[in-house]
């Protein structure tokens, strides 16, 4: 056995977590003790008061929804006061509260857990699984995150790793890991598009792979477009057909809806292999004390018609992302599929039509991210060095007194990087300190971006050079000129600034029902979440 510390690669997913390791230079997925290759990313407080993780936790979601936490990947590293958390709060069935640091947290059985604590339970479980499989302690990991994760979210995942007793050697973007699984040590010179359609999100990245250098050229996506939206189309279709035939509205019964949801997803997955399926749910409801069964045929053709626009939307996003960087479709050499929903035959057919080539076979959509993480992990101290050059997925800048956002580092800027500017004067003349509230996001307004923290400097620092340095993990460091040299300063606070709180309150107060409908149509988020969580509508 080697003397080096044992290291694993972890794909910490919204729905499932996958862990991989490299043995004899070959990466492979570590099976759980039950022989599965995935662990549901679910944590629950059992009725007996124990915290349980994985399949056992997932099993109790219908019976114990208040104490079952999933979708944690959507909340981790977000401020409780942020617009996203405020919106999500009413749709998750477990209780989201403000943690002591102002971040979103979860209350389970009267105790408040931070999101890093909850994610650490999942990471701890995969650590144990890997230790059992490999027969020895594991102390280090490379963990993947979505390319669009901001600084807070990346730091929170690192914190989760630490809490799980893992030295997180590196946070790496999921598409980069997928490209690594494809191109590592193959001596390629190719432009690769990673098309990642998962359970809840769609991401696309274009990378230049040159030998073992992986450079992200451009990246984008829709954080509320994924497999759940496909399921919802089937659910709507089934409920409508059942209502027409039996005059019974299933949407009124959470238990029936949960069964329809499970059957819809299973039918969707079966239709990736078969042309026709029959959804059968005996005793879905009762009428006058008598059971009413649901039986409905669904063909692949029908599913394609129900979801065509969702698939089209992913290609629109691909085109936008390519246009941003001036890359033509014909310049893409390979397409790698990631995420379970990319296995749908319609997706593969449309890829052929859109890019004029088949997606790459042999790179497993559910496994490549974890395998790439394991390869990177192994390379950190190994002989095959890997160079990763990233692109910033969302601009970073600071808030102006007007509530507008001044960009310092642009989207798709190469990372690592340093961008310098001058310390602005304080918002109000006469203030003893300059407070620079740092934000990340695509909007021109701070209220729509994510708040990262505040740097507080004496007013005498006005006009001095300040650097935003982004390291290879896309983590932000702030340095201020001090006697001619740049010196790193810590964020004075991560508590939401008053200016932002006010702006959020105004925004929420202004929202009208039309916006809600628009949001639902755009991303299907809120209806999706309700169904995702089995909460009925
Ligand atoms: P992921 O987040 O990558 O685990 O993707 C999960 C999503 O992929 C879920 O919405 C699944 O229903 C969907 N999925 C898994 N397998 C298939 C398949 N064979 N065909 C279509 N969708 C699938």
Image: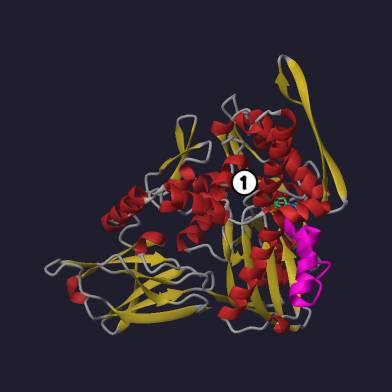
Location of the N terminus by quadrant is: bottom right
Q: Is residue 265 magenta?
A: no
Name the one closer to the observer, 29 or 284. Answer: 284
On the image, which quarter does residue 285 sit in? Answer: top right
Q: Is residue 358 left or right of residue 489?
A: right
Q: Is residue 41 left or right of residue 361?
A: left
Up/down of 228 relative to 390, above or below: above
Spot occupied by residue 432 in the image (x, y as percentages of width and height): 15, 66
Residues shaded magenta: 341-367
- Residue at 49% in and 46% down: 88
Name the one closer to the observer, 139 or 369. Answer: 369
Q: Residues within 10 Å of mark 1 (few under 14, many from 20)?
A: many
Q: As drawn, which residue projects farthest toward the left?
A: 430
Spot occupied by residue 32 in the image (x, y as percentages of width and height): 76, 46
Q: Is residue 116 left or right of residue 337?
A: left
Q: Is residue 354 magenta?
A: yes
Give the residue at mark 1: 122
- Residue at 71% in and 15% down: 288
Name the one closer to the observer, 16 or 138. Answer: 16
Up/down of 149 relative to 103, above or below: below
- Residue at 71% in and 19% down: 287
Spot occupied by residue 375 in the image (x, y as percentages of width and height): 71, 68
- Residue at 67% in and 43% down: 236
Spot occupied by residue 446 in the image (x, y as percentages of width and height): 35, 63
Up/down of 319 relative to 515, above or below: below
């Amino acid at each position: 056995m080697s003397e080096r510390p044992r290291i694993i690669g972890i794909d910490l997913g919204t729905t499932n977590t996958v862990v991989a390791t490299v043995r004899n230079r070959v990466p492979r997925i570590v099976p759980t003790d039950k022989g599965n290759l995935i662990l549901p990313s679910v944590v629950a407080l059992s009725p007996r008061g124990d915290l349980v993780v994985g399949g056992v936790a997932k099993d109790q979601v219908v019976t114990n929804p208040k104490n079952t936490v999933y979708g944690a990947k959507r909340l981790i590293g977000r401020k409780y006061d942020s617009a996203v958390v405020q919106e999500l709060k009413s749709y998750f069935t477990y209780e989201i509260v403000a943690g002591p640091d102002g971040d979103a947290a979860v209350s389970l059985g009267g105790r408040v857990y931070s999101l890093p604590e909850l994610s650490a339970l999942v990471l701890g479980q995969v650590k144990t699984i890997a230790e059992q499989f490999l027969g020895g302690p594991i102390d280090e990991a490379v963990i993947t995150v979505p390319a669009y994760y901001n600084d807070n979210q990346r730091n929170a995942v690192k914190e989760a790793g630490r809490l799980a007793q893992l030295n997180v050697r590196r946070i790496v973007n999921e598409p980069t890991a997928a490209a690594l699984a494809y191109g590592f040590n193959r001596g390629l010179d190719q432009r690769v598009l990673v098309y990642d359609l998962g359970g809840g999100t769609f991401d696309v990245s274009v990378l230049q792979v040159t030998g073992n250098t992986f450079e992200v050229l451009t990246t984008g996506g829709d954080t509320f477009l994924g497999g759940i939206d496909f399921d919802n189309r089937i659910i709507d279709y089934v409920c409508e057909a059942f209502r027409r035939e039996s005059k019974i509205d299933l949407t009124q019964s959470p238990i029936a809806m949960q069964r329809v949801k499970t059957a819809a997803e299973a039918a969707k997955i079966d239709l990736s292999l078969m042309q026709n399926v029959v959804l059968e749910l005996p005793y879905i409801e009762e009428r006058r004390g008598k059971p009413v069964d649901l039986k409905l045929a669904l063909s692949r053709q029908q599913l394609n018609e129900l979801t065509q626009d969702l698939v089209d939307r992913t290609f629109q996003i691909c085109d936008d992302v390519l246009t941003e960087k001036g890359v033509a479709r014909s310049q893409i050499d390979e397409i790698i599929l990631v995420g379970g929903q990319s296995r749908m035959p319609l997706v593969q057919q449309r890829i052929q039509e859109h890019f004029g080539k088949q997606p790459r076979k042999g790179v497993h959509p559910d496994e490549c991210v974890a395998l790439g993480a394991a390869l990177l992990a192994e390379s950190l101290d190994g002989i095959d060095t890997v160079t990763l050059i990233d692109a910033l997925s969302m601009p970073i800048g600071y808030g102006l007194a007007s509530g507008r956002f001044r960009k310092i580092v642009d989207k798709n800027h190469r990372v690592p990087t340093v961008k310098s500017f001058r310390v602005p004067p304080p918002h109000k003349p006469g203030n003893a300190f300059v407070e620079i509230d740092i934000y990340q996001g695509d909007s021109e307004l701070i209220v729509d971006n994510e708040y990262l923290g505040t740097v507080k400097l004496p007013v005498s620092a006005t006009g001095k050079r300040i650097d935003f340095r982004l390291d290879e993990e896309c983590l932000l460091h702030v340095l201020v000129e001090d006697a001619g040299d740049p010196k790193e300063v810590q964020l004075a606070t991560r508590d939401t600034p008053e200016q932002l709180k006010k702006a959020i309150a105004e925004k929420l107060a202004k929202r009208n029902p039309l916006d809600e409908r628009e949001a639902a149509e755009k991303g299907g988020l809120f209806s999706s979440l309700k169904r995702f969580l089995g909460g009925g509508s």
